[in-house]
Image (cartoon, rainbow, N blue to C red):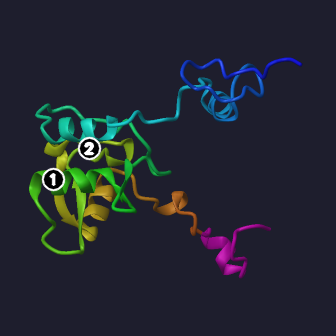
């Protein structure tokens, strides 16, 4: 009887299923093109956060871990998923003045994963949305998913189809 094949990744030790890889490494290979990608090494998040809090550069500091669909960095704190810029803003500037305040970006590049503490400030949601409009990032007019063409609404056609 042939001995079972072991995953070819050093230190894994699990049974190899496909291409000499275990299920977990094969899935990472399919998703990322690398069987070792998609994982955060132990302590890497804590190390990055400590470096980010002390970052003094003027350039944006990109969040290297998980981001949401909008591009904002995310992490889990005490069982809740929170925005990375919120965690860093609180660490550097203290707690927000009120629960309605958000971690806003002077650079306007939070959607690109910026977590530079020098770019973060406490702002209200209205201030944040106004800043988005000024920078041309707001979904207004034709870019708004709820936009209907004036001619189609005159005919009573809600979604603009003829």
- List the residue tagged with mark 1: 91
Q: Residue 41 in the image: state x and y as whole percent.
A: 40, 33
Residue 81 is left or right of residue 32, and the answer is left
Q: Residues within 10 Å of mark 1 (few under 14, many from 20)?
A: some
Which numbered disc, 2 or 1, marks the residue that appears first in the sequence? 1
Q: How many marks on residues?
A: 2
Q: Nearer the viewer, residue 133 or 88?
A: 88
Residue 19 is left or right of residue 58, and the answer is right
Q: Quadrant of residue 100?
A: bottom left
Q: Nearer the viewer, residue 125 or 29?
A: 29
Magenta residues span 148-162
SS state under label 1: helix
Question: Which one is in front in this view, the residue at disc 2 or the one at disc 1?
Answer: 1
User: In this rendering, is residue 91 above or below 57?
Assistant: below
Which quadrant of the rendered structure holds the N terminus? top right
- List the residue tagged with mark 2: 115
Query: CB atoms at circles 2 and 1 under 8 Å apart?
Result: no
Label 2 and label 1: CA atoms lie apart by: 12 Å
Residue at 19% x, 39% y is 50
């Amino acid at each position: 009887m042939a001995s079972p094949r072991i995953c070819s990744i050093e230190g894994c030790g699990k049974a190899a299923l496909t291409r000499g890889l275990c299920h977990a490494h094969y899935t990472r290979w399919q998703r990322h093109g690398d069987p070792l990608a998609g994982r955060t090494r132990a302590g890497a998040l804590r190390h990055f956060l400590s470096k980010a809090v002390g970052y003094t550069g003027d350039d944006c500091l990109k969040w290297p871990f998980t981001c949401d669909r909008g591009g904002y960095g995310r992490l889990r704190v005490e069982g809740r998923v929170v925005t990375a810029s919120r965690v860093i803003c609180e660490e550097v500037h203290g707690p927000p003045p009120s629960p309605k305040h958000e971690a806003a970006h002077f650079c306007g590049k939070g959607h690109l994963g910026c977590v530079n503490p020098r770019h973060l400030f406490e702002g209200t949601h209205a201030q944040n949305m106004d800043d988005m409009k000024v920078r041309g990032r707001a979904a207004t007019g034709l870019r708004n998913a709820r936009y209907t063409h004036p001619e189609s609404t005159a005919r009573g056609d809600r979604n603009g189809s003829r």
